[in-house]
Image (tube, rainbow, N blue to C red):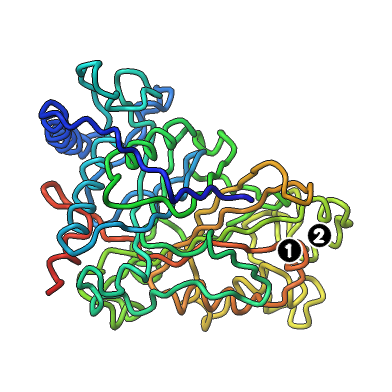
Amino acid sequence: MTTVHINDTQDTEQPKSPHRRSWLKGIGVGAVSLGAGALATKAYIDSSDGTQTKQDAYGTHQAGIITPQPAAAIIVVFDVLAKDKKGFEKLLRTLTDRITFLTQGGQLPQIDPKFPPLNSGIMGDKVFPDNLTMTVSLGASVFDGRFGLTDLKPQYLQDMQPFPNDALEPESTDGDLSIQICSNTAETCIHALRDIIKNTPDLMTMRWQMNGFLPPHMIRKLGKDTMRNLLGFKDGTSNVDAKNDALLNELIWVSDHANSAGEPAWAKGGSYQVVRLIRNRVEFWDRTPLQEQETIFGRHKLSGAPLGKPNEHDDPDFASDPDGKRIPHDAHIRLANPRTPETRKNLILRRGYNYSQGLSKSGQLNMGLLFVCYQSNLLNGFLTVQGRMNGESLEEYIKPFGGGYFFSLPGFAKGEYLGQGLIQAAV
């Protein structure tokens, strides 16, 4: 089993003392102050070892979507335990406070040792930001009536339905709320996850989790390099340019663009998040001839260039190859992005990670792709792209088994909380 499922155990050893409540209040105030300071601090300090690198907590959009990818990630999905709108608002406020503090860092207070520690201690007595981002997104089930949000659901948000090659496992699929946690190190991601769990025991419980990784040199190149998946091919070469604001407003952010027509007003600044857990049959793949592997992808394995081209970012020029003699019509890159004016609206922002979790029950390597992508229109984006790829030759070597569709909340300003527009719009 590749995912961790925790539905039963909750931390009930929270200290009840006024001391703890005062600290939690204080740490929230401190986090606001630190976050304001971050506005004047550039995201990356070249001379540091990375521990002091920080991303702004505030903004129109949440961090972690167009932010350059660091090396470590956790996707964790929760079921919400809050019973009503007031409880759900409390959850969002708590997440906002914790995320603001954790992403900016700060000194931890000393407490009475008769009580459990307020922090896991993984980072010592001072939390450092370590390039941490935490992106909160909501599943369709949040809009089922428990919190009075039914009429405010983003129009394309839905439970994940299986495509023909999928074998979705219910215990690893969907959920009320996802948090994408990314950082320079796995320890910082784990520290953040444990902090969130410790501070929300009565508000939500974990449903499933997947850890991902990228090569450490991705940090130094600030996302300018293209990751390789565990099949050995570069993955995301033709990704949407995260520095092109016009393109982002059309394809990634819910905005005033026609691609976002019909969305509720509160959703502006948010984005649809797709998570797919895709196992790679690597033993089978490693016995496949190189020429066949490259034909399946439509790219040269080592350089990442389209077949027949010398460089990774060369245009595959499908128009000059109408019969598919150079790049077959069912090649992965041709189906994913045909590069026609009509399919431009289908472009998505990929933000995937590799995963490896030991052996499967059948004794095979349990590894693959933690696929994550963002788009302003789920129907025009992932659903259409994946529909085009049904039956592709690559399906023989991959098996999607879980994930979900979520809506990443808009960002928040100082003094606001995540999802405030949604809560205020509810009757």
Q: Identify the residue under disc 2.
A: 293
Percent position of residue 262, x then y = 28, 83
State the residue at coordinates (11%, 48%). Answer: 415
The quarter of the picture where residue 25 lies is: top left
Query: Could you say whether the residue bearing mark 1 is in a helix, strand or loop?
Result: helix
- Vertical order, 315 against 117 (above or below): below
Neighbours of disc 2 within 10 Å: few (<14), some (14-19), many (20+) = many
Q: Nearer the viewer, residue 231 or 41?
A: 231
Which three-letter amino acid code belongs to the residue tagged 1? Phe
Percent position of residue 329, x then y = 74, 78
- Vertical order, 110 against 139 (above or below): above
Percent position of residue 135, x then y = 35, 51
Q: Identify the residue under disc 1.
A: 297
Is residue 397 at least partly visible in the picture? yes
- Vertical order, 127 against 258 (above or below): above
The C terminus lies in quadrant: bottom left
The reply to whether the C-beta atoms of the residues labelled 2 and 1 are less than 8 Å apart is yes
Which three-letter amino acid code belongs to the residue tagged 2? Gln
Disc 2 to disc 1, how far (Cα)? 6 Å
State the residue at coordinates (22%, 55%). Answer: 418
Q: Nearer the viewer, residue 62 or 307?
A: 62
The quarter of the picture where residue 319 lies is: bottom right
Left-right relation of 40 to 42:
left
Left-right relation of 186 to 48:
right
Percent position of residue 409, x then y = 29, 60
Number of marks in picture? 2
State the residue at coordinates (57%, 45%). Answer: 225
Left-right relation of 421 to 331:
left
Query: Could you say whether the residue bearing mark 2 is in a helix, strand or loop?
Result: helix
Neighbours of disc 1 within 10 Å: few (<14), some (14-19), many (20+) = many
